[in-house]
Image (tube, rainbow, N blue to C red):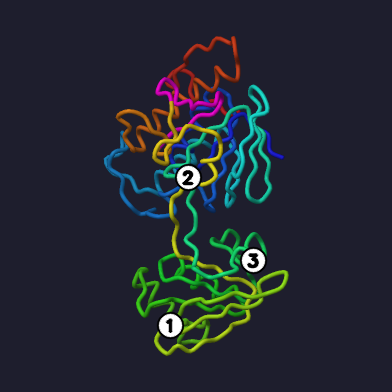
Amino acid sequence: MITTDLAIIGAGPVGLFAIFEAGLLKMRCHLIDYLPQAGGQLSEIYPKKPIYDIPGYPSVLAQELVDNLLKQAEPFHPGYTFGERIETLEKRGERDFVLKTNLGTEIHAKVVVIAGGLGCFEPRKPEVAGLAQFENGKGINYMILDPEKYRGQKMIIAGGGDSALDWAIYLSEVCSELTLVHRSESFRGAPDSVNKVMKLAEEGKINLLLNTNLTSVAGTDKLESVSMINTKTQETQTIATDHLIPLFGLSPKLGPIENFGLNIDKSAIEVNTDDYSTNIEGVYAIGDINTYKNKLKLILCGFHEAALMSHSAYKYMNPGVKYTMKYTTVQGVNEF
């Protein structure tokens, strides 16, 4: 069980900046994100994309911004839970929330902040029957959190983008047997990565199957084999494996947040712009996941929302306690 002041759902730029704003008010934060690392879209989709509308930075790369936000949050020692999604939110009383993830992690918090960007990024799954029975630790995963977990084991990676190519290159030195399956003859990834994969296939270090689609999975208590078909020759084959990692990209969805009892408008959470609170007292929504009149989906707007939210959350956590605004130019940033 994890106990914290603020449970922040989403570790994108706005969620990360909320750590800093909350930290200035001596509030501890724990962030939960379904992705395997901090940064949200910035890290997962376009880490090398330049951003031009961050105040004080004529241009900053997305990953550089994430790295700086993480460094800015360090003095406040936040906690992180990656690779897990919040499934349920229960309010047990004033300043008493319990959140549970898909893997059973339980977080107790006084305040809940939803900073989920466009929502929960869910993996695009292949249309193969029976996938669900081998998910959650039974052989099928849609992201790789710890490569060492697969050392000396058999793996099939399905996909043709940068993620599939990069992991195939890296895991070719980790897995005892690695197969890369792609539905086309051409890849969508970087040419350099494509060349490396082709060379690994020529050297026999990976098994490369092009024009091939997955058709079925099999096993008893865990995944044991994957069947597939060549779309040109119609030839079928079944490969024994310990793991299947479909890497078909991510799609944004509101996900379980829809069931939290919040007011939703067109897949966004309605908030009060005084402090970005929702219809549930003690629950806030900041960043792209919220909606209000004249809303602008900009990172800098999310930063503003995080600041106002933090001061409101402090008042909610400390009823009757008067807070005097102190500027960082005067008191600096004090670690705690």
Residue to which mark 1 is pinned: 199
Question: Distance of mark 3 from mark 2, alpha carbons?
Answer: 24 Å
SS majority, magenta: loop
Residue to which mark 3 is pinned: 134
Image coordinates for residue 197, horizontal then vertical, percent: 44, 77
Residue to which mark 2 is pinned: 254
Q: Nearer the viewer, residue 214 or 321?
A: 214
Q: Which structural element holds mark 2?
A: loop
Q: Is residue 167 left or right of residue 238?
A: left
Image coordinates for residue 112, horizontal then vertical, percent: 56, 31
**Which class describes the residues within 10 Å of circle 1: few (<14), some (14-19), or many (20+)?**
some
Tell whether label 2 touches label 1 (CB within 8 Å). no
Q: Amino acid at mark 2?
A: Leu
- Number of marks in the rendered image: 3
Q: Nearer the viewer, residue 245 or 237?
A: 237
Q: Give the foreground label among 1 and 3.
A: 3
